Image: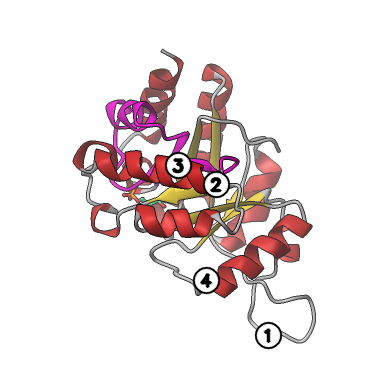
Amino acid sequence: MKVTYPLILINYKTYLESLGNRGILLAKAAERISTEYGICIAVAPQFLDIQKIATEVSIPVFSQHLDPEPPGSHTGYVTPESVKGAGACGTLLNHSERRLRADTIEDSITRSKELGLLTCVCANTSRVGMALSALNPDMVAIEPPELIGSGISVSKAKPEVIKSAVEMIKSVNPAVHVLCGAGITDGTDVLRAMELGSEGVLVASGVVKAKDPEKILRDFASTLTR
Ligand code: G3P
């Protein structure tokens, strides 16, 4: 499944609103909006929902995390092979809610690349984003932790973070696509993020917990096609 930019990547986290059948319905809404507006919308469900969702929709599916351990004697880990086998085309790594050591991030990126999985590495600051871009992920997503789940968007509350992240990351590794996230709730937040140089948004509660997620996604996508 091809990922294009601008990208709207919906992190399902462990919200009940995006678990099981509700997650499938959300993915189908994302697919409809993606087709209607020609904008790439990807979803990152919980591990056990990846396979079902990847079978039901034709949009990119990511895992929220994976472990770099190789197949074999490693109980309780989630290998890139299992994520890929379930139908995902990429993974989030190092989310603020699932932070990793730098060497583990590097190993996870290397293993993912070997299997053709895209990597979106999260960073809490521009400087961390710059450092992680040297590990050659496909995307770096800047998310100030204090704004996550707040409904106050990074693009409006901390525009300087996005601007500096784009400059710093591109100076180290121009091939890395820069996304941003935290508190994104409407189309104006998405538009502002793009104006600041972001190539997409990573969003969770603003979509997952919305009364009408499809309406919110339409608002995001229409902003990107204007
Ligand atoms: O991964 C996306 C996330 O951390 C942002 O969360 O709820 O502020 O959109 P939220």
Q: Is residue 199 magenta?
A: yes
Residue ID at (61%, 67%): 106
Specify the segment rendered in magenta: 174-203
Residue tagged 3: 179
Q: CA distance from mark 1 to mark 3?
A: 33 Å
Q: CA distance from mark 2 to mark 3?
A: 7 Å
Q: CA distance from mark 1 to mark 4?
A: 22 Å
Q: CA distance from mark 1 to mark 2?
A: 29 Å
Residue tagged 1: 75
Mark before the other along the chain sequence, 3 or 4 = 4
Mark before the other along the chain sequence, 2 or 3 = 2
Residue tagged 2: 139
Residue ID at (44%, 54%): 129
Residue ID at (57%, 67%): 105
Q: Residues within 10 Å of mark 2 (few under 14, many from 20)?
A: many
Q: Are marks 1 and 4 in contact (CB under 8 Å)?
A: no
84 or 182, nearer to the observer: 182
State the quadrant of the N terminus.
top right
Does the residue tagged 1 have its C-beta within 8 Å of any atom of ligand 1?
no
50 or 196, nearer to the observer: 196
Where is residue 130 shown, x and y percent of the image? 45, 54
The amino acid type, in three-letter code, at marker 4 is Ala
Mark before the other along the chain sequence, 1 or 3 = 1
Q: Is residue 115 magenta?
A: no
Q: Are marks 1 and 2 in contact (CB under 8 Å)?
A: no
